[in-house]
Amino acid sequence: MPSISQAQIAAVIGWIVAQGVGYGFLDAEQAKLVITLGSSLLAAAWMFADGWRHHGNAKVKAAAIAAPGDTAAELKKTNAA
């Protein structure tokens, strides 16, 4: 799966808005609205996705720590991830 950054998504939103304005589908006020909503939704989605990822990492680390027979090296490697 490709790694997509916030900047790339914001660039796509800006490009879509620019095309809409250029072709006359959007006026300046509508363009502002689309950019504002798009960036707000992007920020919220990124926040929830990052929280979900951190939660998953924490569960994996907790399972590794709780497993009997783990060595200090294995725990250190798990905590570095």
Image: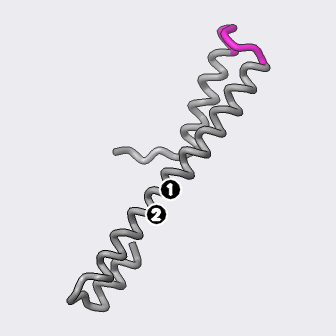
In which quadrant of the rendered image does the C terminus lie?
Answer: bottom left
Residue under circle 1? Answer: 50
* Left or right position of 73 against 69: right
Where does residue 20 sit, x and y in percent of width and height?
64, 15
Which residues lie in the magenta part?
Answer: 21-28
* Left or right position of 23 against 59: right
Residue 20: in magenta span:
no
The residue under the point 28% across, 84% down is 74
| Image vertical order of residue 75 relative to residue 41, above or below | below
Where does residue 12 sit, x and y in percent of width and height?
56, 31
Do residues under tags 2 and 1 come within 8 Å of each other at their CB atoms? yes
In which quadrant of the rendered image does the N terminus lie?
Answer: top left
C-alpha gap between disc 2 and disc 1 = 6 Å
Quarter of image, res 30: top right
Quarter of image, res 9: top right
Amino acid type indicated by mark 2: His
Amino acid type indicated by mark 1: Asp
The residue under the point 61% across, 45% down is 43
Q: Which SS type dominates the magenta stretch?
A: loop
29 or 62, which is in the foreground?
62
26 or 64, which is in the foreground?
64
Residue 24: in magenta span:
yes
68 or 28, which is in the foreground?
68
| Image vertical order of residue 29 relative to residue 50, above or below | above
Where does residue 67 sit, x and y in percent of width and height?
25, 82
Please tell me how crowded label 1 is: few (under 14), some (14-19), or many (20+) other residues with Cα within 10 Å. few
